[in-house]
Structure formats: C-alpha cells, structure tokens
Amino acid sequence: MVAEPREIRDGTVTTPRGFLAGATYAGLKTYGVDKLDLGILFSERPATAAGVFSTNHIVSPSVTLSKRHIASGYARAIVANSGCANCCVGPQGLKDAQEVVAIASRKLGVAAEEILVCSTGLIGVELPMALLRQAIPKVQLSADGGHALARAIMTTDSRPKEAGVSFTIDGVEASIGGIAKGAGMIHPNMATMLCFMTTDLAVEPGFLQRALREAADASFNMVSVDGDSSTNDSLLLLANGTAGNKEVREGTPQGDAFRQALEAVCVTLAQAIAYEGEGATKGLEVVVEGARTLEDARCIARSVASSSLVKTALHGNDPNWGRIMMALGKTKAYVEEGKVALYINDVCILEEGRPIPFLRDAVVKIMSETRVSFRIQLNLGDSSARAWGCDLSEEYVTFNSAYTT
C-alpha cells in the first residue's frame, strides 16, 4: 500500500530520519551577522547515493572528486562551501578538495571515499585552506541543522530554498527532504545549482540513480534564469534506510510512489530557483500541452522560458505573443502553426495560429502579477511539459556587470 506525498511544513534536508547537518562561518565570504559559508550533511547510517552533475566541459575539481566517490553507489556525508568555486585554479584545486574531504573524514569517523564535496562561488579563486582547516572541525551537527546548511550554501540567493514531503509505503512512514541554492548561471543543462536531498527509505542503488536523473529532467533541467550553466552544478541524493522498509525497486508500486515524491520535492526546489533568479521581479511558468512527444514538449517549454526577448517582454508586462511563437518555432520540435493556441494566465490570445480579440489592458495587468503562466496548446498529441523561469530586469544587468568589482 502506498500513499500520495504530503508537503512537510518547514521540511529540509534533515527532515528524514538519521540525517544530521550543521554550518559555520569560515571566512570565505565577507562577514555579516548570522552569515554562514561552510556546512556538512551526515548520514548516521551507511547510505545509498546518487548524483547528477554539471555538463559544462569546465568543471570544478570538487565535482571531479565527488563523481569519483559516488561511483561506488554509496556515501555518508557531503561537505560544502560557498564563496569560492574552487574552479580554474589548476592542479591545486583537486589537492584542496581532497584535503577538505580528509579533514571531514577525521571529524566524522568515516572513510574519505564516503564523503562528497561541493563548492560554489567565484571562479578562479583557490580554496582558503588555512580557514577551512580551522572551520571544518568546528561544525556542530544536529537533527535540525538542515536549515543552517541551506543558508551556508547560498551565494546571490535572496533566501534559503528548502522542501520536504512525507508518504507511506507498505505501512512505513517515510520522507524526502532537500535544500538547494541557485540564482544565477541557471539554464536547463543539469544541474544548474547545488542541491542536496535525503530520504530515510532503503532504495536499490541503480533505481535511485535512474529515479534521480528522471526527476532532474522533469524539474531542474526545465529551469532557466539567464542561459548559462555553472561549472559546479551538483545534485546529490542519499538514502539511508532508517525507515526500515523493504528495499524500494523499479517496476513496483513502491517505486512509482518514490518517483512521484522525489519529483515533487525537485519541482518545488526548481520553482524556487527559477522564481528568485538574480534581479527577478516575477516568476514564469510555461506549460506546453498536446505535443507529439515528451521531448518536443520539453524542448518548446525550455525555449520559451529561456528566451531573452520573452523574458524582457515579461518584465515590461508586454503581451507580445509573437515572441512566444518565435521561441517555440525555433526549436527542432514538430509544430503546425495553424493548430497552436496560446493563453496568458488562462486568457486565450491566439487560436488556430491566429490572434483573437482580447482586452489588452487586462492582459497587461495580469502580466504585472508576481506569477505569470504561458500555456501553449499544440493540438498534435498527448505529451506535455512544464518549464520555469523569470523576467530579465535592469537589476540583473547591473548586478552582474559589477560581480567582482
């Protein structure tokens, strides 16, 4: 017997049983009251692990080392810092990542190969190891430390991003929790952020990896803020089996329930990233329906959500539907112009590929809301997809024009 996932209020990465976390200020970022820049996530039991990483050809050595360690399918901990990406620093970057893991290994009493490492921040700056050598042993772990860890991984984020759901599998109460960071360098090319997720279920390793990849494709890979994909993107999931369930496997009702719950948490975190992009004043959801294939639906949704012209029209409350048609038409997806219908917050402005009369002032007012939806009906098949983004504002340009100055 399985049950629908239920949102957990104040859910976080330590909501599932058997996980501890903590954070501290190490000095990697400019000092501020209550500022944190270093944290650890720890499973009290051995855990199955899965990961999805940046597809950028330039990656941080922190990503390189995590990919090596997670290849075993198991991990116990994640140590993460913000303020420094540990990227494009030559061979020293891998040496520093290995030392970070070694220090955490001694603190936690687990093998270095069971620890994953993540960094985020400015590219081209070495990790300040003198600071980290002092700070890592000081991190205090607790069952409610997920909230602090969510703050510690923030860079330009306006607030922490956290989520959790609970559900029942064969009479066993289980949960999935997660935290994420990301506001810039966000584009659908996986993983577009740092995201750490946990579950107290026991899950077969191969299925855990496939389920995470599928959830990423339906969520984080459908997000775009600015068209750029980071060098440090890492999506990590640990499953420690503390719930005491029979191992969840693919092709079972239990596996389907786990997939559904995992995707729900991923979508919540992905939306938070999209709607709080750098300089954003409003969030955008693009819904594509009636596509011939899922690939076509996702391709179109991503194209519209990531179009600079669409994003600037959104910022100006301009119902310039021609830009939406341009963005969907430039993809490789199959489209028949004469069958397309387009809605802005459920107001139909295009039908059978032709504009229909609408009250422009009313649509302008609708587009001034903090959440705007573009729904595209292709009328070609049964496949659908959603993508998320935000407007492109003057503040984004101002902020990123002076990022290091």
Image (cartoon, grey):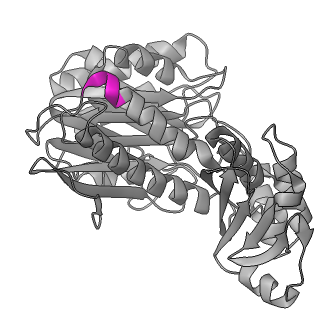
Question: Percent position (x, y) of residue 307?
Answer: 81, 52
- Residue drawn at (26%, 36%), measured in percent from left and top? 252
Between 384 and 271, the one nearer to me in the picture: 384
Residue 315 picture location, percent across and down: 79, 70
Q: Main secondary structure of the magenta part?
A: helix
Q: Quadrant of residue 97?
A: top left
The residue lying at 64 percent from left, 21 percent from top is 88
**Depth check, front residue: 166 or 67:** 166
Q: Looking at the picture, tell me which residue is in the foreground, 228 or 242.
A: 242
Residue at figure coordinates x 45%, y 12% from the top left: 95
Establish if 261 lies above or below 332.
below
Task: Please state the extent of the stretch shown in magenta in the rendering.
Answer: 204-208
- The count of marks equals 0
Residue 4 within the magenta-colored segment of the rendering? no
Identify the residue at image location x=29%, y=15%: 113
Q: Where residue 140 sits: x, y (%)? A: 20, 44
* 353 on left or right of 244: right
Query: Compared with residue 206, is residue 150 higher up or lower down, i.e. above or below?
Result: below
Q: Nearer the viewer, residue 388 or 129?
A: 388
Residue 125 is left or right of residue 98, and the answer is right
In the picture, residue 325 is in which quadrant? bottom right
| Percent position of residue 383, x then y | 61, 48
Asked if one can make out residue 276 in the rendered structure from this viewpoint, the answer is no
Left or right: residue 324 versus residue 400 is right
Tell me if residue 355 can be seen.
yes
